[in-house]
């Protein structure tokens, strides 16, 4: 195909278009940048202008877990000018099997902050912002509006639909991916240029309709494969090269070593998304489902429970723990439920604690959902976790 033919096809195909980075934001590369990104500069499709676009780009990554890890790693290495990372979870030992930017030293830390530090280890001059919070209806639109591209590495349906709806409202390109055991899916949702998530899957599925990684398992290297592909799609969008996966759903099967493609079109009968009201209800339901019984430190000290359980990792516990407690790592509780706790013979009230309270809430939620939990057992999470105890008791 001649250059003119290729240009004509690019103009006719919505998957081909100019990058979303305005020309006025581009600046010449410094000598150090030219040396660092030399392998990009020798690619004719990227070249100096493509690298300048990467250096000028502002990218939001939703989730710093399995998919977020390779996304963040490769976008930082590619020279993306600014990365914002939003995630409200903390690093757990079971994450390290696939979430390769986190280390053992990061156990118990917010994933967003651990991911930020991983970027700075790679490039100490990088511009990166950690947002240790959940993406929700109240912050999605402003966050999407201030970024050029968003990558969705979330692990729940409510957040995925929230990302797609926010992208449609703000006109922000969204790179979407999901994984399950040995397989993955990737697509690009570009408002006005192709279908969105609601054209592909119109209704938000029930939260428990697909097994989580904890319940169903996942091959760590597959997460890297899918996340790296998502990073490639983001780079294509930013630089304007190649043919992004707009209107296409890529299906990867690692066991069969195959990749298939499904064509997806916009549903002409689907009303445009104009508000986040519908998805806010789903997010609200998820938040309500996530709320768990808790206890304050003052209440704990006033009346000790029959069982006080430290669910942190052994390395964290070595730095200090609450008096009179027992230890049982979160991973066992998530995997076995009540069967992991039963040998400790709890009676009446039991309180679980971690570093800050986030993991103990997950553990309480898991136990309360277990049909084997005996009647009469009052399971609670310690608000503020060990950090709260350390701040008020050890360092008053």
Image: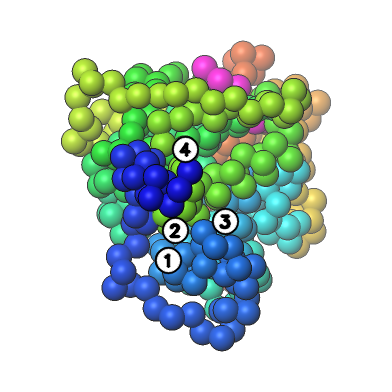
| Mark 2 vs 4, N-terminal side | 2
Does the residue at mark 1 contact the one at mark 2 (Cβ under 8 Å)? yes
Looking at the picture, how far across and down is residue 138, in whole percent? 28, 47
Spatial separation of the CA atoms under disc 2 and disc 3:
17 Å
Q: Camera-side residue: 102 or 303? A: 102
Q: How is the image coloured?
A: rainbow
| Mark 4 vs 3, N-terminal side | 3
Which residue bears the numbered disc 1? 53
Which residue bears the numbered disc 2? 239
Spatial separation of the CA atoms under disc 3 and disc 1:
17 Å
Which residue bears the numbered disc 4? 245
Q: Residue furthest bottom?
A: 31
Q: Which mark is residue 240?
A: none
Q: Vertical placement of 283 versus 268: above or below?
A: below
Does the residue at mark 3 contact the one at mark 1 (Cβ under 8 Å)? no
Taking 20 as reference, is 69 left or right?
Answer: right
Q: Who's the residue at 31% across and 59% down the image?
A: 146
Q: Is residue 210 magenta?
A: yes
Spatial separation of the CA atoms under disc 4 and disc 1:
20 Å
Does the residue at mark 2 contact the one at mark 4 (Cβ under 8 Å)? no
Does the residue at mark 2 contact the one at mark 3 (Cβ under 8 Å)? no
Q: Camera-side residue: 264 or 274? A: 264
Q: Who's the residue at 78% across and 30% down the image?
A: 344
Which residue bears the numbered disc 3? 72
């Amino acid at each position: 195909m001649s250059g003119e033919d290729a240009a004509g096809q690019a103009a006719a195909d919505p998957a081909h278009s100019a990058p979303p980075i305005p020309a006025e934001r581009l600046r010449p590369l410094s000598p150090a940048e030219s040396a660092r990104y030399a392998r990009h500069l020798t690619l004719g499709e990227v070249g100096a202008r493509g690298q300048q676009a990467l250096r000028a780009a502002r990218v939001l990554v939703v989730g710093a877990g399995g998919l977020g890890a390779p996304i963040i790693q490769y976008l930082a290495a590619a020279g993306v000018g600014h990365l914002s990372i939003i995630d409200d979870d903390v690093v757990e030992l079971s994450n390290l099997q696939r979430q390769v930017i986190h280390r053992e030293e990061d156990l118990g830390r917010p994933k967003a902050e651990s991911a930020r530090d991983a970027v700075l280890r790679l490039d100490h001059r990088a511009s990166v912002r950690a947002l240790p919070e959940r993406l929700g209806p109240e912050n999605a639109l402003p966050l999407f509006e201030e970024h050029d591209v968003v990558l969705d590495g979330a692990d729940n349906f409510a957040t995925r639909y929230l990302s797609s709806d926010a992208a449609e409202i703000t006109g922000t390109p969204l790179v979407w991916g999901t994984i399950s055991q040995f397989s993955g899916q990737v697509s690009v949702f570009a408002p006005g240029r192709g279908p969105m998530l609601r054209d592909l899957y119109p209704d938000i599925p029930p939260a428990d309709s697909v097994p989580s990684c904890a319940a169903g398992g996942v091959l760590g290297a597959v997460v890297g494969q899918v996340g790296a592909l998502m990073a490639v799609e983001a780079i294509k969008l930013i630089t304007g090269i190649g043919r992004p996966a707009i209107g296409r759903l890529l299906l990867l099967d690692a066991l069969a070593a195959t990749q298939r493609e499904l064509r997806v079109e916009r549903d002409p009968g689907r009303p445009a998304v104009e508000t986040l009201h519908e998805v806010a209800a789903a997010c609200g339901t998820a938040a309500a489902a996530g709320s768990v019984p808790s206890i304050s430190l003052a209440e704990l000290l006033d009346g000790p429970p029959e069982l006080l359980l430290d669910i942190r990792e052994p390395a964290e516990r070595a730095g200090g723990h609450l008096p009179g407690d027992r230890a049982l790592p979160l991973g066992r509780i998530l995997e076995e439920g009540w069967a992991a706790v039963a040998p400790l013979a709890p009676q009446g009230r039991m309180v679980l604690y971690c570093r800050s309270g986030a993991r103990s809430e997950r553990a309480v939620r898991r136990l309360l959902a277990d049909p084997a939990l005996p009647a009469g057992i009052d399971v609670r999470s310690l608000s503020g976790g060990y950090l709260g105890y350390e701040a008020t008791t050890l360092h008053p």
